[in-house]
Amino acid sequence: MKVVIMAGGRGTRIAELFPDIPKPLIPVDGMPILEREVRSLAAQGFKDIILTVGYLADKIIAYFGDGSQLGVKIEYFVEETPLGNAGALFQLKEKMGEEPFFLLNADAAFDVDFNRMLDFHKKHGGLVTLFTHPNSHPYDSGLVIAGNDGKVEKWLSKEDERPQWYNNRVNAGLHVIDPKVLELSLKNLEIDPLTGYPKGKVDLDRQILKPLCGTGKMFCYDSPEYVKDMGTPERFHQVEADYKNGVVQAKNLHNRQKAIFLDRDGTINKYVGFLRNIDDFELIDGVSEAIKKINQSGYLAIVVTNQPVIARGEVTWDELHEIHRKMETLLGKDGAYIDGIYICPHHPDKGFEGERPEYKFDCDCRKPKPGLLLQAARDFNINLAQSIMIGDSENDMLSGENAGCKKTVLVGRNNKSLLDVVKLILE
């Protein structure tokens, strides 16, 4: 499978630190960032690489050569004139053949289990798979809006009007693309009759990917793995620190993860009994700071919540998802994010007006049973023996114990706050 890495950017914002070095060769803890990425790809079996280069291309070519010293084959496409971040793809189309290819952005530091992402792409049968993740600043990032089946419905740029409440889901600049997409895109691009290629610059997001929204042909691959832009001095220093501390490599889902599981009502938001109205959802003081500390610690932050209001017919799935979008929006405004949300909609007791009988049975996921935690562990390769359950009820504690968590901690009401507990855990 071919991998195309866009490595032609100038890196103008970070030029004050490295004025004469192309961005892909900026050293991070003693090794150029692009070399780290190529080594990660090679270790996973992806060794057929094309670099699209422009600014200071000769330095990049001189450094990597044919790639043999890294155990890969590297070809180059040199943009003599800027083609945008997708124009080169049309001139490389014949090299791609008919199989999907990875398209990666060298502007970001990443360490990702690409085989896992490729399996997702094949399973879902789309033309494009976007690597999406939550980040600490969704309020000024482009957002990807997807359905519960992962199909992309809308793509909101930073300047676009957005809904009041939204999922913290951001495109990370890593893609699996079927070459058929390029053929489809030609219909909407002005073509140079002499070359047969699009005229001028082609923007990947606006001209190739966004038109696929709502077609059912583009999917989100949500993952908590490490992908971070290092385009500013501040972000560069953070990326370098993360490499030095082993955070980048550890987040690759090929490696076992550790998680802090969080109950919702009474742990994250103020307890109001059965929460039926979105206006009653209010974060507990200090929760955003606590979850931000989890985000920075290397633990995944996973919400596991019983929501019998679904089975009781008191809240619809759409209403529940909107409540969770409010939670993600409020946390995101404070620089915090959730890596995953797992919901049990079941309730074994019958006799409620408007109840939904399809959810009225004794399931394996309703806490104190461990089903929600076990499913998260399968999805994110979590080592439960290194993970922690935090909640405000005895059922939360039992679910953590039943799942094999190393520790369970009670919070809320007469106990310590989530922030106090997280500080103690991470000290």
Image (cartoon, rainbow, N blue to C red):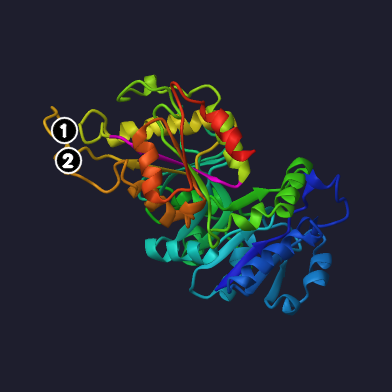
Q: Quadrant of the C terminus?
A: top right
Q: Secondary structure at mark 2?
A: loop
Q: Nearer the viewer, residue 209 or 2?
A: 2
Report the residue that reaches farthest toward the right. Answer: 20
Rendered residue at 56%/46% (across/down): 299
Q: In the rendered structure, find residue 336 and report the number of the disc placed on it.
A: none
Q: Secondary structure at mark 1?
A: loop
Nearest to viewer (mark 2 / mark 1): 2
Instruction: Tell me: 127 left or right of 274.
Output: right
Query: Disc 1 marks which amino acid?
Result: Glu
Give the labeled residue for mark 2: 360
Check residue 240 for magenta coloring. Answer: no
Report the residue that reaches farthest toward the left. Answer: 351
Chain-order first, disc 2 or disc 1: 1
Check residue 301 for magenta coloring. Answer: yes
Q: Local crowd at mark 1 within 10 Å, few (<14), some, or many (≥20)?
A: some
Tell me whether the residue at label 2 lies in contact with that at label 1, contact meaning CB atoms closer than 8 angstroms. Answer: yes
Q: Which residues are magenta?
A: 298-307
- Residue 272 in the image: above or below residue 360: above
Rendered residue at 80%/46% (across/down): 14
Q: In the rendered structure, find residue 355 and report the number of the disc placed on it.
A: 1
Where residue 423 appears, x then y in whole percent?
Answer: 60, 33
- Residue 151 in the image: above or below residue 111: above
Query: Disc 2 marks which amino acid?
Result: Lys
Q: Is residue 149 visible?
A: yes
Q: Nearer the viewer, residue 333 or 78?
A: 333
Q: Nearer the viewer, residue 45 or 362?
A: 362
